[in-house]
């Protein structure tokens, strides 16, 4: 009898813990469907796995549900090999099962999400940065008190988000992302000449107080301003995710 009673208590405790985790809410990760940059040398665009899978791990390990959204839905392309946290997320946290069934904008209800994140890779600059439906979803999540985060080239994906009052979401806010000073020295996108928009230029044009390397104590610092959380480079992608969670908790 005692064993049965203890078993029931353990089951109830497990269900209680599970429900607590489920009640934390959902986070939306925006990813790109773009395979390449349209040049003869087939420079890869897509999404950088190391800027999407590690933040995903942080979100789910802290009890949040994660949905993926892309312009056309379904499977999305990734660069970089799965190592470290990325491998863990793929093997133990159903990363591939979720991201390969990314949602289309038409089926996403902004009211379901406490935050939205865009990781790096060049892809978002091609098919997210000017996708009106996705930009509208990001705007509504933000105006509903949600958190917006980005890493590397990810902030270029929300640089053009406009709020209901007609202002750009980034206007007057400290934001960072992959900098011009690095872009023009790298051959990955032919020194940026293959890109439809240059991230730093677009953020500045839309009124963001863009933070350069000289503005930061360290180039891997995370910038937080009025519920927007950003960083320049991929090593800080997990820190962005954790700071987003801190902002969610603070907003409670």
Image (spheres, rainbow, N blue to C red):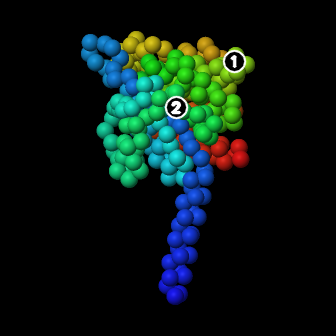
Q: Can residue 179 be seen in this view?
A: no
Count of numbered labels shown in the rendering: 2
Which residue position holds label 2? 107
> Can residue 160 be seen by looking at this rendering?
yes
Query: Mark 1 or mark 2, which has the lower sequence index?
Result: 2
* Residue at x 47% of width, y 29% of height: 104
Label ID, residue 178: none
Labels 1 and 2 touching (C-beta < 8 A): no
Residue 222: image quadrant is top right
Is residue 201 placed above or below 95 in the rendered structure?
above
Q: How crowded is mark 2: few (under 14 residues within 10 Å), some or many (20 or more)?
A: few
Q: Name which residue lies at 55% across and 19% down.
A: 132
In the image, is 183 to the left or to the right of 62? Answer: left
Say whether residue 163 is left or right of residue 97. Answer: right
x and y, in percent, of residue 218 in the image? 55, 35
Which mark is in front, 1 or 2? 2
Residue farthest toward the right in the current orientation of the protein: 165
Q: Residue 154 at what x, y percent from top left? A: 50, 28
| Residue depicted at x 63% and y 36% | 111
Describe the element under mark 1 as helix, strand or loop: loop
Which residue: 52% across, 27% down?
106
Quadrant assignment, res 144: top right
- Whole-Å distance between the Cαs marked 1 and 2? 26 Å
| Closer-to-camera residue (147/218) | 147
Q: Residue 167 carries which label?
A: 1
Query: How many neighbours does mark 1 have within 10 angstroms: few (below 14), some (14-19), or many (20 or more)?
Result: some
Indicate left or right for 183 with 213 as reference.
left
- What kind of element bears circle 2? helix
| Residue furthest bottom as drawn | 1
């Amino acid at each position: 009898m005692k064993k049965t009673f203890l078993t029931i208590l353990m089951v109830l405790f497990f269900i209680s813990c599970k429900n607590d985790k489920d009640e934390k809410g959902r986070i939306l990760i925006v990813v790109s469907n773009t395979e390449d940059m349209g040049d003869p040398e087939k420079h890869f665009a897509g999404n950088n796995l190391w800027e999407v899978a590690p933040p995903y791990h942080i979100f789910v390990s802290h009890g949040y549900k994660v949905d993926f959204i892309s312009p056309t839905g379904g499977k999305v392309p990734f660069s970089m090999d799965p190592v470290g946290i990325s491998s863990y997320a793929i093997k133990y946290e159903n990363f591939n099962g979720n991201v390969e069934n990314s949602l289309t904008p038409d089926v996403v209800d902004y009211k379901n999400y406490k935050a939205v994140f865009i990781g790096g890779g060049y892809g978002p600059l091609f098919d997210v940065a000017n996708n009106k439906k996705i930009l509208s979803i990001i705007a509504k999540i933000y105006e509903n008190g949600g958190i917006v985060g980005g890493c590397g080239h990810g902030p270029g994906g929300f640089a053009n988000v406009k709020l209901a009052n007609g202002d750009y979401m980034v206007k007057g806010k400290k934001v960072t992302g992959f900098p011009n000073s690095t872009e023009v020295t790298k051959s990955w996108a032919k020194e940026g000449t293959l890109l439809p928009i240059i991230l730093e230029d677009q953020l500045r044009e839309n009124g963001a107080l863009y933070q350069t390397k000289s503005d930061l104590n360290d180039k891997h610092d995370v910038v937080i301003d009025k519920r927007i959380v950003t960083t320049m480079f991929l090593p800080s992608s997990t820190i962005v995710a954790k700071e987003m969670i801190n902002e969610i908790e603070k907003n409670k």
